[in-house]
Amino acid sequence: MSIALWIIAGLLAAAFLAAGAMKLTGKREQMIASMPWVADFSQPQVKAIGAVELLGALGLVLPALTGIAPVLVAVAATGLALTMAGAVVVHLRRGDGAAGAAPSAVLGLLAVVVAIGRFGPAAF
């Protein structure tokens, strides 16, 4: 169980690291072309979402690797799951349908798996 949680956390960390970095460093016009939802948010809001994703990605792996407050892995996973729940709501409200919300839903569900596993049976 622990190995599976490590793999899921690593994949999630990579995905959120890339997504967060893109939102923090990208230009608004370029992001709107690839992510139309950005048009509904201000640049500071998009950067804040990117910062949350980037910090969540670090929180998924660094506490466990360093052994310093490893409970933060579960906390980070919970925060990312809530972030993805918000993303699903945004996509559905925008009319993107299930196909638009699916990536966020999958990432959110994987984050829930990590949170439940690290809070429960496979805690550090």
Image (cartoon, helix red, strand yellow):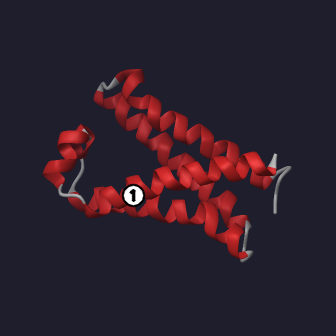
Q: Quadrant of residue 110?
A: top right
68 up-or-down from 72: above or below:
below
Q: Farthest residue to the left: give it.
A: 29
Q: Secondary structure at mark 1?
A: helix
In the image, taking residue 84 as reference, residue 91 lies left or right, namely: left
Disc 1 marks which residue?
20
74 up-or-down from 89: above or below:
below
Residue closest to the eye, 11 or 107: 11
| The N terminus - image quarter | top right
Q: Farthest residue to the right: give it.
A: 121
Callout 1 crowding tier (Cα within 10 Å): few <14, some 14–19, many ≥20: many
Callout count: 1
Relative image position of residue 38 (x, y in whole percent): 24, 46
Q: Quadrant of residue 91?
A: top left
Relative image position of residue 82 (x, y in whole percent): 54, 47
Residue appearing at x 83%, y 53% in the figure: 122
| The C terminus - image quarter | bottom right
Residue closest to the eye, 8 or 122: 8
In the image, taking residue 37 as reference, residue 16 lies left or right, namely: right
65 up-or-down from 30: above or below:
below
113 up-or-down from 10: above or below:
above
Residue appearing at x 69%, y 42% in the figure: 113
Residue appearing at x 73%, y 68% in the figure: 70
Residue appearing at x 29%, y 30% in the figure: 94
Q: Amino acid at mark 1?
A: Gly
Relative image position of residue 84 (x, y in whole percent): 48, 43
Relative image position of residue 68 (x, y in whole percent): 72, 77
